[in-house]
Structures are given as structure tokens and as C-alpha cells.
Image (cartoon, rainbow, N blue to C red):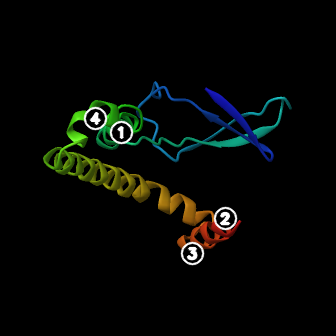
Amino acid sequence: MEIWAISSYDEIHCDAPLPDRKILAESCFQTKSLPWPGTFSRYRITITTLGVDLESLLRNALRKRNWLVHDYFRERAEEFVSNAGRQEMLKEIDECRELFQTADASLDSIVRPLRTSQGITDERIEREMKRRAQV
């Protein structure tokens, strides 16, 4: 569990499921605020899960990325010396690229609404990428 101070409110992040599943996400409740006893603060319950499919997809993409970076060329050294072997390697890399693009698009569908609500638009990201490329 993490507790973050954000202005005059605290956020409590807990990865454990809520014990009472009858509480709806985005419900609000009041409780005594610490360290100022006697004052009340509003807390919002937010339940965010990636879902089993997306979590599995991201884990698979990470595993595949790590394999490509750390083991792929060592494991494919013999295939690399022949044209047929290189063609097979290109197929494997294309499959990895498709997996990464699928994972990226799936994650983007969750992240995009969050970032745009904070003013981080595609145009702003593009400008920042261009600025960093010039440095």
C-alpha cells in the first residue's frame, strides 16, 4: 500500500481487492483526516484493473522483449549465417513487432483518456519528441 500526499488530500493505493465488493467504484466516503483529528475529508474509491487479457499481453510482450534483447542473437547465431536462417529470423522479429504493436495499442486505449484529461495531447507529445531530438 502506498500513501501519497497530494495538496490537501491523500491518495491510498492498495493492490489488494476490496473486502466488500458491494462498494461501487467512484463511490465517495468521509472519514476523519489524519494528522488533524476532528476534520473530515472526502475520499474516492477508484478500482482500476488492467484486466487479465491486457495484463497477460503486457507480460508476454515484456518477456519477448527481454528475450530479444538478451538472448535472441546468441540463440540464433547458426541461423544468422544462412539466407534461409535469416529469413526465419525476420519472420520471428515480425511476429514480435506485431505483439509489441498490439500491446502498445491496447495500453494506449487506457492511457490516452487519462493523459488527455491532464492536457497531455498527441500534439504536445510530438512537440516534446521533436524538441528532445534537437538536443
Mark in front: 4 vs 3? 4
- Find disc 1 in the rendering and name its residue: 68
The answer to which of marks 3 and 2 sits earlier in the sequence is: 3
Mark in front: 3 vs 1? 1
Sort mark 3 into few (<14), some (14-19) or many (20+) by Cα contacts within 10 Å. few
At x 46% / y 37%, what residue is drawn?
23
Residue at far front of view: 81
Image quarter of residue 121: bottom right
State if disc 2 and disc 3 touch (CB < 8 Å): no
Relative depth, front residue between 100 and 86? 86
Image quarter of residue 102: bottom left
The answer to which of marks 4 and 1 sits earlier in the sequence is: 1
- Find disc 4 in the rendering and name its residue: 77
- Find disc 3 in the rendering and name its residue: 123
Relative to 126, residue 4 above or below: above
- Please tell me whether mark 1 sits on a helix, a strand or a loop: helix
At x 36% / y 31%, what residue is drawn?
71
Image location (x, y in percent) of residue 104: 39, 54
Using the numbered discs, state the Cα–Cα distance from disc 2 to disc 4 in whole angstroms. 36 Å
Amino acid type at circle 1 is Leu
Sort mark 4 into few (<14), some (14-19) or many (20+) by Cα contacts within 10 Å. few
- Find disc 2 in the rendering and name its residue: 132
Amino acid type at circle 4 is Ala
Using the numbered discs, state the Cα–Cα distance from disc 3 to disc 1 in whole angstroms. 31 Å
The answer to which of marks 2 and 4 sits earlier in the sequence is: 4
The answer to which of marks 4 and 3 sits earlier in the sequence is: 4
Amino acid type at circle 3 is Glu
